[in-house]
Amino acid sequence: MAASSTPTGYHSVTPSLIVRDAAKAIEFYKQAFGAEELSRMAGPGGAIMHAEIRIGDSIVMLGEENVEWGTKSPLSTDGNPGSLHLYVADADAAFQRALDAGATVRYPLEDAFWGDRYGKLTDPFGHEWGIATRQKEMTPEEMERAGAEWMAQQAAGQSAQQQPA
């Protein structure tokens, strides 16, 4: 029996992405997020069946979509049921680096009410990435208060937009 139930270098939860054109995805993640390729395994026909990359201190698994095996990328399902959240030292630089590599903006960077500098991108393979830098530690109570204020501001802005001119 292994000494640990979690392999060295992994965390308890390890994301695994299904992508269309895994080789291009690996290159994008290298350019956009500074990923390091750890392994690559070809399946039938030469497509990448399983690969692993490291982004920061986390491993991300990925593989080629294969409809016959029931694995589809967000590009084949017209949507994305989840997203990845990446903490970095400089959200502005990381956000721009990902844009330069081919990502598109889903939510622009802003100083978020929960204490992060935060924005969200969609990569060319349909996966969403939240990019953040922690700017301020907040208690749950402070975060709840700030969230309520933010939601009130959003509601007031929507009401103002709905008023006739």
Image (cartoon, rainbow, N blue to C red):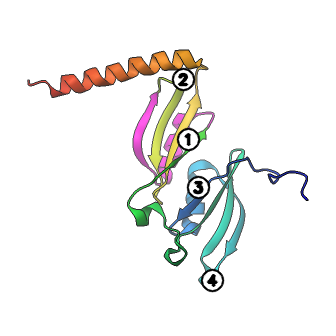
Report the number of discs: 4
Q: Nearer the viewer, mark 1 or mark 2?
A: 2
**Mark found first going from the N terminus, 4 or 1:** 4
Q: CA distance from mark 2 to mark 3?
A: 26 Å
Q: CA distance from mark 4 to mark 3?
A: 24 Å
Q: Tell me, for residue 115, which label it has, or none.
A: 2
Q: Which residues are magenta?
A: 88-111
Name which quarter of the figure residue 137 lies in: top right
Mark 2 lies on a secondary structure that is loop
**Residue 111 location, x and y as percent?**
47, 25
* Rendered view: 69 above or below 16: below
- In this view, the residue in front, 152 or 39, is 152
**Mark found first going from the N terminus, 4 or 3:** 3
Q: Residue at x 55, y 35 (%)?
A: 132
Q: Tell me, for residue 29, which label it has, or none.
A: 3
Whether the residues at callouts 2 and 3 have beta carbons within 8 Å, the answer is no
Q: CA distance from mark 1 to mark 2?
A: 18 Å
**Residue 146 location, x and y as percent?**
46, 18
Mark 1 lies on a secondary structure that is helix
**Mark found first going from the N terminus, 2 or 3:** 3
Q: Tell me, for residue 94, which label it has, or none.
A: 1
**Residue 103 location, x and y as percent?**
46, 51
Q: Nearer the viewer, mark 2 or mark 3?
A: 2
* Residue position for label 4: 44
Question: Considering the image in quadrants, where does the C terminus appear?
Answer: top left
* Rendered view: 46 above or below 70: below
